[in-house]
Amino acid sequence: MPRMDTKRVRRPAEVAVAAGAVWLAGISPVPGVYLEPDPARRLTMLRKGQRSWVVGQHVAAAATAAMPAAFARLALALPAGRARAMVGTAAFALAAGAPLFVSQLALRASDLERFAARRLPGWPFLGYAWLHVLALGSLSGALASLPDREKEAAAVGLAALGSGMVLAKTGDIPPFVFYVAEQLAAASFLRRDPPRHPRASSLLKQ
């Protein structure tokens, strides 16, 4: 395949890495709330940190929307071929899942009682999560088609496989797993391709 132009992919890859960092910062403004098993205590924690909680949900929503846009731009920056098609598939999956999770974030911000009691509808999150599994699998395939990125491809592929197994078994998963894996995938595009062997280059010119 044609060599990847790291100058073209740098900006969208950096945006994807930054979007993951912003998402991680925004999703947990009230420490321990996700791990607290008692609904009453969880509600007390949310009310005590309500302002930070609401702001955090808005920040996470913005990052949720930014991630598919960044990967779409990344796909367009890649040369035609398998990597471009696979990153485009990942961007499509992320774009399809983003509204599902943004709607959940809106409910988390506006209805603390339902969130604390874990009475929010579960299907939007499941749809969003499975679409992220698809995105990770596609990103793994994209990385596997590029030179010298076998380790990153394997790591992202394992994240997709592990996430899918956990989802199938429990119906739930901490979504930070997706964003960390997507950051890894995006960061791997920032590395330059290894130089071609001189003999290989001469053969390609013949």
Image: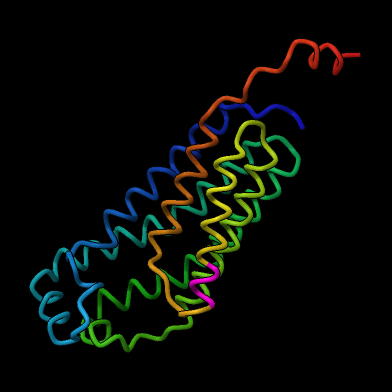
Q: Taking 54 as reference, is 40 above or below it?
A: below
| Nearer to me, 92 or 162 | 162
Q: Measuring 14% from the left and 67% from the top, which residue is drawn there? A: 51
Q: Quadrant of residue 18?
A: top left
Between residue 103 and residue 198, name the one nearer to us. Answer: 198
In the image, what residue occupies the spot 40% across and 64% down? 175
Q: How is the image coloured?
A: rainbow
In terms of secondary structure, what is the magenta stretch mainly?
Answer: helix
Residue 96 as seen in the image, left or right of residue 202: left
Is 106 situated left or right of 93 in this image? left
> Which quadrant: the N terminus?
top right
Foreground residue among 43 and 100: 43
Quarter holding residue 147: top right
Q: Which percent across, then down, holds residue 181? A: 47, 51
User: Residue at horizontal 85%, vertical 18%?
Assistant: 204
Q: Residue at x 55, y 35 (%)?
A: 189
When the figure is inspected, residue 139 is found, relative to residue 5, above or below; the finding is below
Quarter that holds the C terminus: top right
Q: Which span is picked out in magenta?
A: 164-168
Closer to the camera in the image, 30 or 151: 151
In the image, is residue 169 above or below residue 206? below
The outermost residue toward the right is 206
Residue 180, percent from left and from top: 41, 51
Residue 53 lies within the magenta run? no
**Position above or below: 105 against 114:** above
The reply, left or right, for residue 157 in relation to residue 84 is left
Residue 151's image quarter? top right
How many marks are shown on the rendered structure?
A: 0
Residue 62 horizontal/vertical position (percent): 37, 57
